[in-house]
Amino acid sequence: MSSQQLETSSYLKNDSIMVQCTISVLNVAEPTVRDHPSATVPASLCQHLADLLRSGTGADVEFVVAGESFLAHKYIIAARSPVFMAAFFGHMREKNSRFVLIEDMEAAPFRAMMHFIYTDTVPELDWLDHAAITMAQDLLVAGDKYAMDRLKLICENKLFSCITAETAKTTLALAERHNCKRLQAKIEFMLRTLPG
């Protein structure tokens, strides 16, 4: 188009040119599992670590808890707990030891704690029964002892949501002993408002 044609066209108004165009947007999304139902998603890091814990492959430490043995990996455990970091890589006697005796814990909570260390999950707390509450209490103690704040908070939240008149006093004592201020405040309020 020449400049003369442009000046006389309807596209030029008040020394401005108006351009009209059509834009088509193509949706080019990444394929998902829904698009390909036969596709399988490879295992996650948590699954690989759970398998490593289960198999004991490459384990460099053995915990003995209530007569049961648990094979583990010092680097993984130390990465999750400053207490284990100090024990295995500081100046404590466990540094050069392949065996660690845990005397103040039962096997079931220790197993759950190890599963948490490797996978960041605590399946035992998924239920609303007495066993889950007991496990949350035991793991709260372990989380506090081994400075695993995330585990401690998960257990505190579980206990926070499951307080009953029957569990209030024991949970309050636990909250006071292990510095769980929010849990302690809720139970104290609950006990003040209960009849009788």
Image: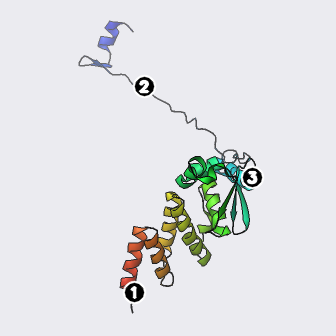
On residue 194, the disc is: 1
| Residue corresponding to mark 2 | 21
The disc, 3 or 1, on the residue closer to the chain's N-terminal end is: 3
Q: Tell me where residue 63 appears, x and y as whole percent.
A: 68, 59
**Mark 3–mark 1 CB contact (< 8 Å):** no
Which of the two residues, 168 or 78, is positioned nearer the viewer here? 78
Q: Is residue 20 above or below residue 110?
A: above
Q: Which residue: 54% across, 55% down?
A: 83
The disc, 2 or 3, on the residue closer to the chain's N-terminal end is: 2
Kind of element beneath mark 2? loop
Whole-angstrom CA distance, mark 1 to mark 2, is: 72 Å
Kind of element beneath mark 3? loop
| Residue corresponding to mark 3 | 56
The disc, 1 or 2, on the residue closer to the chain's N-terminal end is: 2
Residue type at mark 3? Gly
Q: Residue furthest left?
A: 14
Residue type at mark 1? Leu
Kind of element beneath mark 1? loop
Q: Tell me where residue 23 appears, x and y as whole percent.
A: 47, 29
Whole-angstrom CA distance, mark 3 to mark 1, is: 49 Å
Residue type at mark 2? Cys
Which of the two residues, 155 or 13, is positioned nearer the viewer here? 155
Q: Tell me where residue 1 appears, x and y as whole percent.
A: 39, 9
- Scheme of colours in the image: rainbow
Q: Which residue: 36% across, 84% down?
A: 193
Q: Which residue: 59% across, 78% down?
A: 130
Residue 105, image quadrant: bottom right
